[in-house]
Image (tube, rainbow, N blue to C red):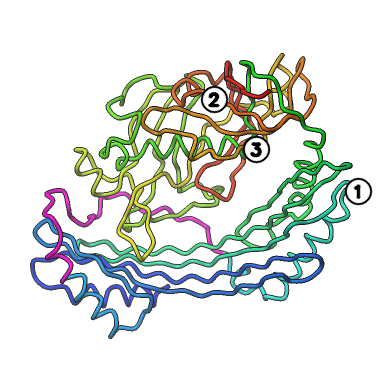
């Protein structure tokens, strides 16, 4: 990582008078192993590196990138970014981020044990996961895939405005996708385990979750259309909250693509919901100490007991909105900074999913959804998605159901959350999951 920082500082040192220069240097190593029928179906070991350079002069921005750390090529990349400035439209809010006094958190996100883990052991992890999943239940008629994947990422951001930032993280996961059968019927299921090092992974859990998700849907029927209470499984609620989070970023607000624009200070959700984006939480799979512009990440409370406090911002959207960055710039080296939530979660309650279900007289536990992103309008809030799960009758899980649609609006669902579970679970995405009980949702089935 010192090499990336030194390289970025050297390129920034080539800046001309009157221009701002930002250099983002990235080095990543990734491994992915997929096992199938006792063999290695695919093995990918990839290493990538690159540099993105932004030049800002007189409110105009130019950008260029290169997939190399070669200084001769980077000199040409800087020249290309300078040339691109001439084609940009002047924007009074266009400028590089400057140090804002927020210190970078000292986060323990790197494991040398992963960087040193041999490829043979990664292959064996995938094969072992497939073996144990295939014999976990006689109704499992096939393991569609068993995978091990990991990444080691290092980056540095240096600017002429005084930012000097580095980050280094590791992460890995196991995942299993299975096919269960009973007569002519089949159902699929998946399970996974995540960690920062191979020793954190639990293949037994990944296998058991995949088997349970598939087998408990055997015999599923299409339910009748009605209105009832839904309990969102953590895997589903994480996706739901991710969509909510996408409407709470400054870029969406400025572009008129957020249903929450101009509603800061209003009660937009039940008081049971406090929604926090905190990339400094080391439990989050996406935790990081620095954002895409090199500023320190920080804990941003977006909803407090249902009241909208504000949005996440990068430097540009913060300035244009009359405020400042919230340390929420997201990017790769080949792109200019966007903005978004990075580790979103609701403050959990205290009860388990089983305890929540026990209080539901008539409902459905939603364990999977399809077409979620295409079925949500972030401006109007209209919400409609295909789903599958288990009926709830008299506080107990009943028959499996599938091929139905749940429909409402984001606004109403946020207001109709009746309870937040205590089963907060960090997943391989930018939002954590937790069981959510939501009342009066339309279910369209038979």
**Residue 30 at x, y percent in the picture:** 56, 69
Rendered residue at 85%/43% (across/down): 184
Q: Give the image quarter of residue 79.
A: bottom left
Q: Residues within 10 Å of mark 1 (few under 14, many from 20)?
A: few
Labels 3 & 1 near each other (Cβ < 8 A):
no
CA gap, disc 1 and disc 2: 36 Å
Q: Relative to 130, does residue 268 appear above or below in the rendering?
A: above
Rendered residue at 36%/70% (across/down): 25
Label 3 SS: strand
In the foreground, 418 or 13? 418
Tell me which secondary structure the magenta stretch mostly adopts. Answer: loop
Q: Relative to 216, does residue 163 appear above or below in the rendering?
A: below
Rendered residue at 85%/49% (across/down): 140
Range of the magenta residues? Answer: 83-110
Q: Give the image quarter of residue 326.
A: top left
User: Which mark sits nearer the N-terminus, 3 or 1?
Assistant: 1
**Residue 164 at x, y percent in the picture:** 30, 64
Q: Which mark is residue 368?
A: 3
Q: Residue 407 carries which label?
A: 2
Label 1 SS: loop
**Residue 156 at x, y percent in the picture:** 36, 67
Side of 88 where 120 appears, left or right:
right
CA gap, disc 3 and disc 2: 14 Å
């Amino acid at each position: 990582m010192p090499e990336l920082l030194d390289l970025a500082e050297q390129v920034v040192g080539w800046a001309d008078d009157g221009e701002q220069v930002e250099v983002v240097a990235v080095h990543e190593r990734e491994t992915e192993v997929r096992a199938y029928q006792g063999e290695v179906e695919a093995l990918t070991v990839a290493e990538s590196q690159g540099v993105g350079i932004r030049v800002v002069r007189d409110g105009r921005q130019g950008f260029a990138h290169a997939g190399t750390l070669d200084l001769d090529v980077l000199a040409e990349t800087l020249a290309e970014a300078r040339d691109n400035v001439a084609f940009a439209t002047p924007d009074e809010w266009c400028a590089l981020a400057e140090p804002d006094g927020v210190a970078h958190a000292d986060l323990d996100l790197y494991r040398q044990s992963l960087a040193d883990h041999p490829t043979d052991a990664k292959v064996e992890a995938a094969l072992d996961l497939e073996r144990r999943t295939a014999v976990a239940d006689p109704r499992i008629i096939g393991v569609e895939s068993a995978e091990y994947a990991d990444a080691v990422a290092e980056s540095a951001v240096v600017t002429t405005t005084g930012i000097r930032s580095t980050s280094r993280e590791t992460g890995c996961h196991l995942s299993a996708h299975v096919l269960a059968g009973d007569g002519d019927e089949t159902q699929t299921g998946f399970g996974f385990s995540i960690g920062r090092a191979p020793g954190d992974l639990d293949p037994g859990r990944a296998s058991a979750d995949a088997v349970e998700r598939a087998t408990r849907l055997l015999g599923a029927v299409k339910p009748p259309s009605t209105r009832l209470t839904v309990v969102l499984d953590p895997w589903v609620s994480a996706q739901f909250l991710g969509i909510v989070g996408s409407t709470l970023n400054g870029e969406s607000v400025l572009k008129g693509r957020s249903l929450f624009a101009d509603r800061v200070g209003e009660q937009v959700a039940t008081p049971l919901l406090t929604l926090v984006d905190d990339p400094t939480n080391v439990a989050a799979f996406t935790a990081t100490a620095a954002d895409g512009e090199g500023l320190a990440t920080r804990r941003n409370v977006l909803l407090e007991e249902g009241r909208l406090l504000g949005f996440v911002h990068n430097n540009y959207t913060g300035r244009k909105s009359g405020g400042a960055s919230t340390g929420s710039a997201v990017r790769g080296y080949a792109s200019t900074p966007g903005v978004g939530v990075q580790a979103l979660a609701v403050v959990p309650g205290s009860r388990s999913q089983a305890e929540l279900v026990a209080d539901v007289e008539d409902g459905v536990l939603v364990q999977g959804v399809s077409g979620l992103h295409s079925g949500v309008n972030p401006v109007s809030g209209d919400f409609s998605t295909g789903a599958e799960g288990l009926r709830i009758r008299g506080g107990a899980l009943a028959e499996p159901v599938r091929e139905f649609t749940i429909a409402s609006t984001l606004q109403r669902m946020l207001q109709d959350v009746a309870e937040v579970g205590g089963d907060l679970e960090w997943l391989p995405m930018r939002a954590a999951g937790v069981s959510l009980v939501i009342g009066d949702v339309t279910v369209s089935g038979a």
